[in-house]
Image (tube, rainbow, N blue to C red):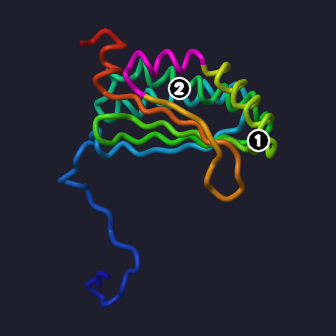
Amino acid sequence: MSVSAVGTVFACPVFAEETDFVPPSPDTLTYSLTLPAEPTSSRIARVATRAVLQGHGLEDMADAVVQVVGELIACACRFTPGDEVYVSLRYREGALRVVLYDGHRRHEHPRLVAACDARRRAALRVLGRVVRECDGEWGLGEAREPGGGTRMWAVVPWRGARGYAGVE
């Protein structure tokens, strides 16, 4: 706490210009968004993803990662219209991890689970091709968080994304 010249104690510190500002780096890329499960959310997520990648010096990953995010959001919106979706972006160990949660609960009957997963995998064909081209991996399954739902994820390595964009 700081004390003024007249002895008054302030609970809120006075903000001054930061002189030792460190710009964002790939290692500090950790973002999440909650969006309505509507068609426009895919565009919003793609624009936000591109801005985040640029802000952290990873614009060379944008072609692949923006496609991945758009495909995941579009798929989730088909399965949970009128609900919300949550997407998370994290850069760790040379790869960008995209995780998406939607409210579509997993079915109890094994045949329904298999049929639903097959529908999702079919809807994510483009995502699968992009991730494979980047030497990454992807998958889907039950969300482990309270409230259930479905978790879809993709890991896009930096080197693979650069190759996908024709940078390397």
For the magenta stretch, what is the residue range?
125-136
Question: Is residue 128 rendered magenta in the image?
Answer: yes
Residue 167 is drawn in which quadrant? top left
Residue 73 point in image, percent of width and height: 62, 30
Q: At numbered mark 2, what does the secondary structure look like: helix, strand or loop?
A: helix
Q: How many marks?
A: 2
Q: Which mark is residue 46?
A: 2
Is disc 1 surrounded by few (<14), some (14 to 19) or many (20+) residues within 10 Å? some
Q: In the rendered view, would you say 81 is above or below 27?
A: above
Q: Name the residue beneath numbered marker 1.
A: 83
Q: Earlier in the sequence, mark 1 or mark 2?
A: 2
**Magenta span: chief secondary structure:** helix
Q: In the rendered view, would you say 29 is above or below 2?
A: above
Q: At numbered mark 1, what does the secondary structure look like: helix, strand or loop?
A: loop
From this viewpoint, which residue is outermost toward the top? Answer: 166
From this viewpoint, which residue is outermost toward the left? Answer: 20
Residue type at mark 2: give it. Arg
Q: Nearer the viewer, residue 146 or 15?
A: 146
Residue 22 point in image, percent of width and height: 22, 47
Residue type at mark 1: give it. Asp
